Image: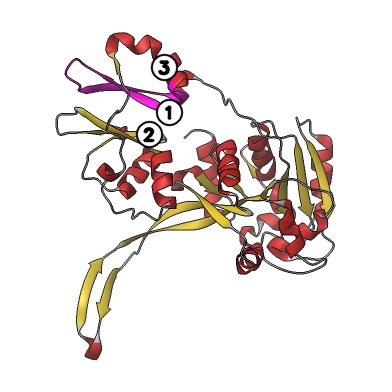
Amino acid sequence: MENVLIHEEDSILQAMRTFDASGRKTVFIVDEENVLLAALSEGDVRRFILSGGDLNEPVSKIANYKPRSLKDDERDDARDFLRRHNIQGLPIVDDNGHVIDTIFWSENNLTKQSELSCPVVMMAGGKGTRLYPYTRVLPKPLIPVGEKPISELIMDSFADYGINRMIMIVNHKKNMIKAYYGEIEKPYTVEFVDEDTPLGTGGGLALIRGLVNETFILTNCDILIEEDYSKIFAHHKAEGNMITMVCSLRNFQVAYGVVEFGEHGNITDMKEKPEFSFFTNTGIYIVEPEVIDYIKDGEFVGFPDIINRLKDDGKKVGVYPINENTWMDMGQLDELGKMENRLRGK
């Protein structure tokens, strides 16, 4: 229970770290005696970030000071209560308002209620040089994480939302990829588009011109996020974006003491192993089909360059921020073991 309790003076950044550490999407704000004061959800934080808010502000600035809760003798009604109010979790309090327990959506085995019908386009043509020597034998999309290749895990996660059309843009060792997906049973179709020469992280999209005429999800073949894709899609549509980039918070601690100095070498500030927080591109996007018109046939171009073309043309490009712990990146060797342990629930 303590893993989801914070205090009013804690920063929004600290709340986000609590989301990650607890694996929950809601935290509860209490006083020194554990009396319930407020609640804060990932959605509250996301809206604050998108409004340009400072993550160092205290949680009291955006918290909900009319939180819902149940008494101990009402906990049997928690399942219906969570669904009825569409909330992720709620505290159980005693007669004096002290938090004595918490109940969360995932603990009640509630299933996803939303579905998507858009196609998924996966960029799967790279050589995976960061994963050498594994990619000397296997193409990156087929490198196993546990019992399945990473690309299959990614497509399975989309299939959970009802998506049944997957398109893979393939190049390096493409015949191995096609052979694998031709043999396994799967609840979705996989179409292949051959990239005969490398076209970068964006140029290959020109190859689906005429094949995809609706909003689609674009993903790399080595990343997995534990987010509600339907909410990302709905945000994209509500904002009227041409592209919505899913961005993850990253916390980075410098391993050394950092020194700042001014004229004549005079030290102005010293910080011992400072921490920095920033948002980074996960490699997952919601994309409107008109974006393909910004790419020439046979052009080698990165998808970030395509984003800049749209921005220069006055088109709207936005972000959807997620927490650090919801993004798993298999693109580097030291992340493979972490991802496998994560998926096994360790």
Dot 3 or dot 1: first in sequence order is 3
Task: Name the amino acid type tagged 1.
Answer: Gln
- Say which element carries label 2: strand
Q: Give yes or no for contact between labels 2 and 1 (Cβ–Cβ under 8 Å).
A: yes
Q: Is residue 125 left or right of residue 46?
A: right
Residue plotted at (83% across, 52% down)? 193
Dot 3 or dot 2: first in sequence order is 2
Instruction: Name the colouring of the figure.
Output: secondary structure
- Say which element carries label 1: loop
In front of the other: label 3 or label 1? 3
Front one among 178 and 68: 68
Task: Name the amino acid type tagged 2.
Answer: Thr
From mark 2 to mark 1, how far is it between C-alphas?
7 Å
Which residues, given as a range, are shown in magenta? 85-106
- State the residue position of label 2: 26
Dot 2 or dot 1: first in sequence order is 2
Residue plotted at (53% across, 51% down)? 335
Indicate the quadrant where residue 153 lies.
top right
Task: Name the amino acid type tagged 3.
Answer: Phe
Q: Is residue 46 above or below residue 345?
A: below
Front one among 34 and 142: 34
Q: Residue 50: x and y, percent?
A: 44, 51
- State the residue position of label 3: 81
Q: Residue 88: x and y, percent?
A: 43, 28
Give the position of the N terminus as an image quadrant: top left
Front one among 99 and 270: 99
